[in-house]
Amino acid sequence: MGTYIPATPNDRDKMLKAVGRRSVDELFAPVPSQMLLKELKIPSGMSELEAFRTMEGLAGKNTVFKTVFRGAGAYRHYIPAAVKRITANETFITAYTPYQAEISQGILQSIFEYQTMICELTGMDVANASVYDGGSAAAEAVNMARSRNRDTVYVSEGTNPQVLDTIRTYCFGYGIPVKTVSLEKGVTDIAALKKALGADAACFYLQQPNYFGLLEDAVAAAQAVHAAGALLIEGVNPISLGILESPGACGADIAVGEGQPLGMPLAFGGPYLGFMACKAPLMRKMPGRIVGATTDAAGRRAFVLTLQAREQHIRREKASSNLCSNEAHCALTAAVYLSVMGAGGLAEAARQSHAKAVYAAKQISSVKGCEPVYGGAFFNEFLTRCPDVGAALGALEKEGILGGLPVRNLPEGGHALLWAFTELNTKTEIDRLVHILKETNGR
């Protein structure tokens, strides 16, 4: 933290003098003595070397895999050194939520740049200052889509189960019905979607690519949903947008997703970042903050909080959302990552992720009993059957490899492994994976 010291002894003396006190003990003299803590029973301080060794010992208890072939919502991507260096600046780390907004021009600008990039990435008109994570972004979007006469939420069965659970939890609190739409060969059954949507339909949530890694027909879904008078919410993997059509181009009204792939490590589960963007007509229903650019009285560029749902802070009983803060530092990380990567770098990361997944799918399918569950197009994840899931994952773990995610009770029956690949996975690693699977499954 370098020079960040909240209050020096000299600062403390000045504050005591300002209130007419000579010491901290004199300041707290009115407090009954039995209420005062006389001593903190904590271990004596450590030297820097001792503290480092202690932390190193604690970290050593974690299992850190050298090779990762698992995704399902959180992905291991390359993070340029500049991202970590810039975001580690203490000016950014110590910045707080901008309640006195216009004074905080630096943090407002960082949020504005982040919002701009999210809009460019998703093809939407407006983005907010971020949400807690991808699941809460989906749930907030569902709540945002409902109206007085339309409050039934439809969700594809191809949605990540954790996201679906979050949507259901939010909707339970509001008394909103949630209905799922069935799949056909691993993707949303558009005919079933059209049949399911009624006059009470508020929205349909579609994950793209879906939980099984397959690419959905988002354009057909948008047409069906809009024909029923509802809104389409598309949950997306941000890296995939380097090569796939944006939600806006496909006809979505709201785009959400987990921003972790944008410069954030897996980090044992967080903190992560939920991004959220929408078309202009829905702007006033979006929760959280929206930062805008303007000019001050002298004509200089300035940033302001254009919209903010104040009910979240001062009239909670009228709040349309429980969102009361933002993941500002994670949002900054995403913005720096996108700036460093650029459009070309993001597209290359997406292309490599897809290419390596295609190669891996072909190689894994050559292993006895590891045939693909579905045959549709995918981005960087796919599902294969496995004769003995436990044995396969155990054998991989012994070699420092985190294998695919076990997916149980498939609609088609049986269990399978959901594999994920990014630009960090090498051909050598993939070939090693296949070799171990062949040994485990008897070729």
Image: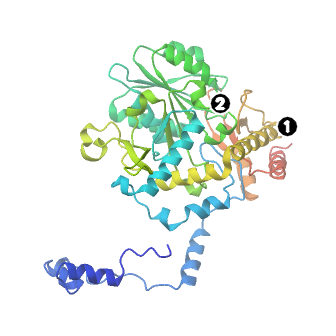
* Residue type for callout 2: Glu
- Badge 1 vs badge 2, beta-carbon distance below 8 Å: no
Residue 295 location (% of width, % of height): 42, 47
Residue 304 location (% of width, % of height): 39, 47
Q: Horizontally, is 375 left or right of 249 in the view?
A: right
Q: How is the image coloured?
A: rainbow
Q: Quadrant of residue 411?
A: top right
Total numbered circles? 2
- Give the residue at the far front of this rendering: 298
User: Of callouts 1 and 2, which one flags the residue occurring earlier in the amino acid sequence?
Assistant: 2
Q: Is residue 158 visible?
A: no
Query: Within 10 angstroms of label 1, few (less than 14), some, or many (20 or more) residues?
Result: some
- The residue that appears at 27% across and 84% down in the rendered structure is 13
Check the image and report above or below for 397 versus 88.
above
Q: Circle 2 is placed at which residue position?
A: 245
Check the image and report above or below for 438 versus 409.
below
- The residue that appears at 53% across and 54% down in the rendered structure is 332
Residue 11 location (% of width, % of height): 32, 80
Residue 177 location (% of width, % of height): 39, 25
Q: Is residue 92 visible?
A: yes
Q: Quadrant of residue 14?
A: bottom left
Q: Horizontally, is 347 left or right of 192 in the view?
A: right
Query: Within 10 angstroms of label 2, few (less than 14), some, or many (20 or more) residues?
Result: some
Secondary structure of the residue carrying tag 2 is loop
Q: Horizontally, is 11 left or right of 47 in the view?
A: left
Q: Depth check: 238 or 393 in front?
A: 238
Q: Depth check: 345 or 225 in front?
A: 345
Q: Circle 1 is placed at which residue position?
A: 366
**Which corner quadrant holds the C terminus?**
top right
Q: Give the spatial CA distance, label 1 vs label 2.
A: 31 Å
* Residue type for callout 1: Ser
Check the image and report above or below for 442 versus 94.
above
